[in-house]
Image (cartoon, grey):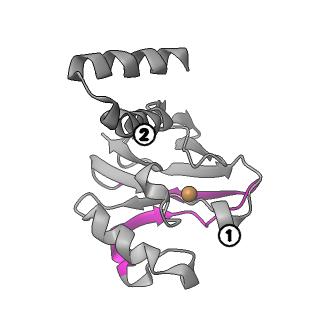
Amino acid sequence: MKQSVLIFAISCLLASCGSNDSADHQHAAAQTSNVNKAVLEADITDGRQVVVLLADDNMKFNAKEVKVKAGMPVELTLKHTGKAPKATMGHNVVILRPDVVVSDFVERANAAAATDYIPEELTGQIVVHTRMLGGGESDTQTFTFEKPGTYTFLCTFPGHSMIMKGKFVVE
Ligand SMILES: [Cu+2]
């Protein structure tokens, strides 16, 4: 916390910002510190790449990037480590194909409450997705990336993908 205040003070100094800008700067700093920068690598077990993503009541995933290989099954588990119910703090993981326009997808997902925010008309844009989970729940999906590339993953609960978003880097 002290460090982020210091960084804020320094960046404020460098930008020689006036008091009017302080709120904006503070807001931006808070958002940045809320984004997890961690990189996960899969554990290979019995020919499967095991990946466990965690999501919590603070609307965060435990990783920003996941490294896996193409052509080998991925066993992806999402665990909701929080206590909040699905209706207010639901989390899923949706992995999109590389050519998808993410902002368009998110817009359609927001309107898909009846199907737990999975837009059924766009399933062709989805590599795989977990169920929408409430606190304490988990879901596992096994699938294979056929081609190397960078694939966006996100939570489609409305508003969450602003922070709950990252990438699978498939080699
Ligand atoms: Cu979420």
Q: Could you tell me which residue is drawn at 54 percent across and 80 percent down? A: 113
Residue 84 lies in what quarter of the image?
A: bottom right
* Residue 69 location, quadrant: top left
Give x and y (percent) for residue 58: 62, 45
Residue stretch rendered in magenta on the structure:
122-145
How far is disc 1 from disc 2 in space, using C-alphas?
Answer: 26 Å
Label located before the other in sequence (1 or 2): 2
Residue 120 x %, y % = 44, 82
Q: Which residue is at 37% across, 33% downward?
A: 22
Amino acid marked by disc 2: His
Task: Count neighbours of disc 1 (C-alpha within 10 A) and say few if under 14, some if 14 to 19, many if 20 or more.
Answer: few
Res 55 visible: yes
Residue 37: in magenta span? no
Q: Which residue is mark 1?
A: 87
**Looking at this view, is 53 or 162 the one in front?**
162
Left or right: 37 with respect to 147? Answer: right
Residue, x 38% and y 45% (percent of image)? 168
Q: Is residue 108 left or right of residue 81?
A: left
